[in-house]
Image: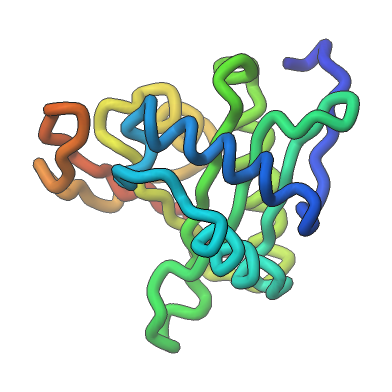
Amino acid sequence: MNDLNYQIRKANENDLNRITEIYNWAVQNTVATFDLENRTEEKAQEWFSLHQDPYYPLFIAEIHNEIIGWASISPFHPRPAYKASGEFSIYIAPEFQKQGLGKRFLATLCDTAQQLGYHTLLGLITGTNAPSLSVAEKLGFKEAGRYQEIGQKFGKILDVVVVQKIFA
């Protein structure tokens, strides 16, 4: 990915269709999300509206005006005491995976979280997703817990690993 001329920027309304396409590809083809049905236009708009709050940023990566992935920080939990804890999500178009963009996105999210005053950033990663777990570990995330056999998708029962980075 380093030799490709891509940029990361904040997402805008015009990006939503492509963001949703990338997410829905993951729904249909991966265990990166435990959604079983594609995100509807209505749900996508609702989700996007949350990410118009500067505290819950949404970024895209693009090459030659083509969106190739997205990353966001969402509320970890709706109760007010969790406000300083965010949950990250990263989704990359299949043809651009395994080229370093996930690591770049996660580094961007960590920098942004610190600038916004987050105390901790968490990720919930499927236990079989070794590449994502490795990227998180390389960027200083530690395993904070594991939900065993919590999700079922594609005929498999799957664990979810909770990774966490605490900012000083």
Q: Position of residue 126 (x, y in %)?
A: 29, 37
Give the residue drawn at x 44%, y 88%. Answer: 80
Viewer-closest of 146 and 94:
94
- The answer to whether residue 156 is left or right of residue 130 is left
Q: Is residue 112 visible?
A: yes
Q: What quarter of the picture does the C terminus occupy? A: bottom right
In this picture, is 151 found above or below 119?
above
Q: What quarter of the picture does the N terminus occupy? A: top right
Give the residue drawn at x 51%, y 48%. Answer: 89
Viewer-closest of 25 and 110:
25
Q: Residue furthest bottom?
A: 80
Viewer-closest of 11 and 105:
11
Give the residue drawn at x 59%, y 30%. Answer: 92
Q: Is residue 166 visible?
A: no
- The answer to whether residue 47 is left or right of residue 123 is right
Q: Which picture quadrant has residue 103? A: top right
Q: Which picture quadrant has residue 82? A: bottom left
In this picture, is 14 found above or below 83?
above
Q: Position of residue 128 (x, y in %)?
A: 26, 26
Viewer-closest of 37 and 51:
37
Q: Position of residue 73 (x, y in %)?
A: 57, 59
Give the residue drawn at x 84%, y 34%. Answer: 7
